[in-house]
Image (cartoon, rainbow, N blue to C red):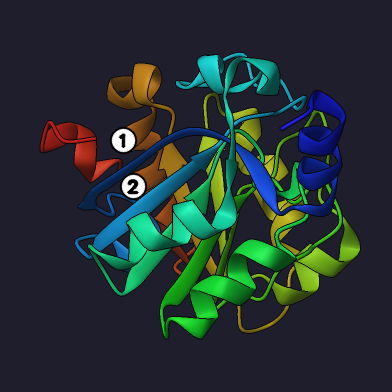
């Protein structure tokens, strides 16, 4: 296939820069402990300094893969699919989610919300970043708000973000992994004083799984 043809299909969302795909246990947030198939899409310009998958940022290093192939792989493993990145909303998610839905699968996304919402989702985990804030439409449709806590100022940011999501959205505070020993006591204290929030931990790292 010619490069121009590939780029056109990527632009339409019929092909995506696939970084990796794997079957594991969801480690974070509302669905932690659930067996799920992860589809990690390359490409992100949000640029979190503590990101643990910086190798996902450059979409050009990840091969454009047809969504039919991605869906075929996913359907073999689980009825719960998690699309993550990178920032998956960099790309048009309509073709991927349409085909996953045709298979009767439950489709989740983990996103910063920095780009317009495409795709049809059963669960939207919004993890906003200060350097590129979410679009209004993502705030309104998020099922779960997950704020990463790196320092004490992140509690202020968390409250600012919680004021923008819909009333049904579940609120989580999650320690940034390298700061967990420092920030977990702070988060526990904060949640006990502000019980509308819940604690999220990266349990997959404690379990030593992907």
Q: How many neighbours does mark 1 have within 10 angstroms: few (below 14), some (14-19), or many (20 or more)?
A: few
Q: Is residue 143 visible?
A: no
Percent position of residue 56, x then y:
56, 23
Task: Tell me the residue that label 2 is attached to.
Answer: 188
Q: Residue at x 39, y 29 (%)?
A: 183
State the residue lying farthest toward the front: 1
Write down the residue under mark 1. Answer: 185
Circle 2 sits in a helix, a strand or a loop, which is it? helix
The answer to the question of whether label 2 and label 1 lie on touching residues, with beta carbons closer than 8 A, is yes
Q: Quadrant of residue 35?
A: bottom left
Task: State the residue at coordinates (69%, 18%).
Answer: 60
2 sits to left or right of 48: right
Residue that appears at 80% across and 62% down: 117
Q: CA distance from mark 2 to mark 1?
A: 5 Å
Looking at the rendering, which quadrant does residue 204 occupy?
top left
Instruction: Depth check: give the residue in front, 190 or 143.
Output: 143
Q: In the image, what residue occupies the spot 30% across and 75% down?
A: 79
Residue placed most toward the observer, 152 or 17: 17
Could you say whether the residue bearing mark 1 is in a helix, strand or loop? helix
């Amino acid at each position: 296939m010619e490069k121009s043809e590939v780029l056109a299909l990527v632009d339409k969302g019929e092909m995506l820069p696939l970084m990796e795909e794997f079957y594991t246990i969801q480690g974070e947030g509302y669905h932690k402990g659930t067996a799920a198939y992860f589809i990690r899409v390359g490409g992100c310009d949000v640029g979190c300094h503590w990101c643990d998958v910086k190798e996902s940022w450059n979409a050009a290093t990840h091969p454009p893969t047809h969504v039919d192939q991605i869906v075929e792989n996913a359907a073999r493993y689980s009825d719960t699919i998690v699309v993550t990145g990178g920032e998956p909303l960099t790309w048009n998610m309509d073709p991927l989610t349409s085909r996953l839905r045709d298979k009767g699968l439950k489709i989740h996304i983990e996103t910063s919300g920095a780009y317009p919402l495409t795709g049809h989702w059963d669960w939207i985990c919004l993890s906003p970043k200060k350097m590129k804030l979410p679009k209004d439409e993502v705030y309104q449709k998020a099922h779960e708000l997950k704020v990463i806590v790196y320092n004490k100022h992140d509690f202020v940011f968390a409250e600012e973000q919680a004021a923008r999501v819909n009333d049904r959205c579940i609120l989580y505070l999650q320690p940034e992994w390298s700061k967990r020993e420092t920030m977990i006591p702070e988060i526990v204290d904060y949640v006990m004083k502000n019980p509308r929030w819940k604690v999220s931990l990266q349990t997959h790292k404690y379990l030593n799984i992907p």
